[in-house]
Every structure is written in structure tokens, then in C-alpha cells.
């Protein structure tokens, strides 16, 4: 995730339906994924180009998200361009090393970064992850496995973890 999108880059966005609600995807001119927003009742935000051109530019992301949600994909093969501080980028890089169907605690993530005392900072950076699902912050749990701290809401985190567990167990993916 070394690239950050420049302020003058053209952005394209579109919203897809999913079992956990609408996902609003934003990509840059090169097709790199800038953000994925889990929408509730709020409208999509940003200055990105929408409509048929936005949907066309986001299609490769939709395809991989659909495959993941159908239990057919465990890893994403997308170019990413999340915007964040150097620390946030490091935190998000650790997230990408957590295997599909596995979880780690925030304290474990802080240790992987080389600072066992950074648990709260790690949690804050995870909360600002602009690429949920693809950069799997849902795989980080609290002490003793407690489901805490997910910007999309704990029910969505629970659904994603149950979905991955079902796929790993060879069961049918979770229903919507």
C-alpha cells in the first residue's frame, strides 16, 4: 500500500449491494481502490464521478467483493491507494497479513508493529481503515476474542467473521 492518491486525481465511485448492506467503492484514475464505505442510511459522500462511468471503473472491485462474499475468494488481488499517515499505513499493512478465517487481538497487532504499548493507537488506526473487508480490520478482536471496535458496526464484523469461518469449514457462506 505504498501509494496515496493525490488530491488532484480523478476519482470514480459506485455503490454495490451486499449481504452486509450497501458498499460504496471509490477508485482513482488508475483503478486503485481508494476507499470502501459501508453505508447505512447515509448517502455516499465525496466528489467522485458516479453513474455508468463510475460503475464501469469500479467493476473489478465489485467482482472481487462479490467473489469474497460468495465464499469463492479468500484474498484480494487489487491495487490499493488508501490515504493515511505513515503509522496508519503500517497498521493497515499488518492487517493484510492476518489469514482469512483467523483473528488476532489489538495487542498482538501492536506487538507485530514493534510497540506492545501502542494498542490504543492501533485501534484508532484500524478505525480509520478506508478499505474494510479488503484490508481486513474485522479480523482484529479485543481481549478474550470480544468483538469490539469496527467502524461498520459490530453486527457487520460478526457477519464477516462468521462468513469466513463457514467458508473455512466448507459450509455454505452466510446468507444475507
Image (cartoon, rainbow, N blue to C red):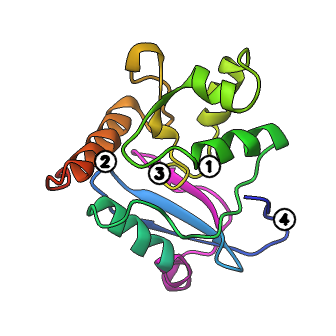
Specify the quadrant that holds the N terminus. Answer: bottom right
Precedes in sequence: disc 1 or disc 2: 1
Circle 3 packing at 10 Å, graded few (<14), some (14-19), many (20+), is some
Residue 68 position by quadrant: bottom left
Residue position for label 3? 133
Residue position for label 1? 130
Element at badge 2? helix
Circle 1 packing at 10 Å, graded few (<14), some (14-19), many (20+), is many
Q: Are marks 3 and 2 in contact (CB under 8 Å)?
A: no
Is 45 or 166 nearer to us in this picture?
Answer: 166
Residue position for label 2? 164
Closer to the eye: label 4 or 3:
3
The residue stretch that appears in magenta: 33-59
Looking at the image, residue 1 lies above or below residue 110? below
Where residue 104 appears, x then y in whole percent?
49, 30
Precedes in sequence: disc 4 or disc 3: 4
Circle 4 packing at 10 Å, graded few (<14), some (14-19), many (20+), is few
Amino acid at each position: 500500500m505504498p501509494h496515496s492518491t493525490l488530491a488532484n486525481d480523478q476519482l470514480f465511485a459506485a455503490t454495490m449491494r451486499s449481504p452486509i448492506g450497501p458498499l460504496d467503492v471509490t477508485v482513482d484514475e488508475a483503478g486503485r481502490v481508494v476507499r470502501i464505505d459501508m453505508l447505512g442510511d447515509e448517502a455516499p459522500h465525496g466528489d467522485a464521478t458516479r453513474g455508468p462511468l463510475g460503475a464501469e471503473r469500479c467493476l473489478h472491485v465489485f467482482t472481487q467483493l462479490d467473489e469474497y462474499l460468495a465464499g469463492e475468494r479468500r484474498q484480494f488481488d487489487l491495487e490499493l491507494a488508501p490515504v493515511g499517515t505513515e503509522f496508519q499505513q503500517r497498521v493497515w499493512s499488518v492487517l493484510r497479513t492476518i489469514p482469512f478465517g483467523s483473528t488476532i487481538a489489538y495487542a498482538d497487532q501492536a506487538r507485530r508493529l514493534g510497540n506492545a504499548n501502542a494498542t490504543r493507537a492501533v485501534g484508532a488506526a484500524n478505525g480509520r481503515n478506508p478499505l474494510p473487508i479488503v484490508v481486513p480490520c474485522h479480523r482484529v478482536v479485543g481481549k478474550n476474542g470480544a468483538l469490539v471496535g469496527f467502524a461498520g458496526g459490530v453486527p457487520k464484523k460478526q457477519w464477516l467473521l462468521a462468513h469466513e469461518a463457514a467458508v473455512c469449514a466448507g459450509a455454505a457462506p452466510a446468507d444475507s
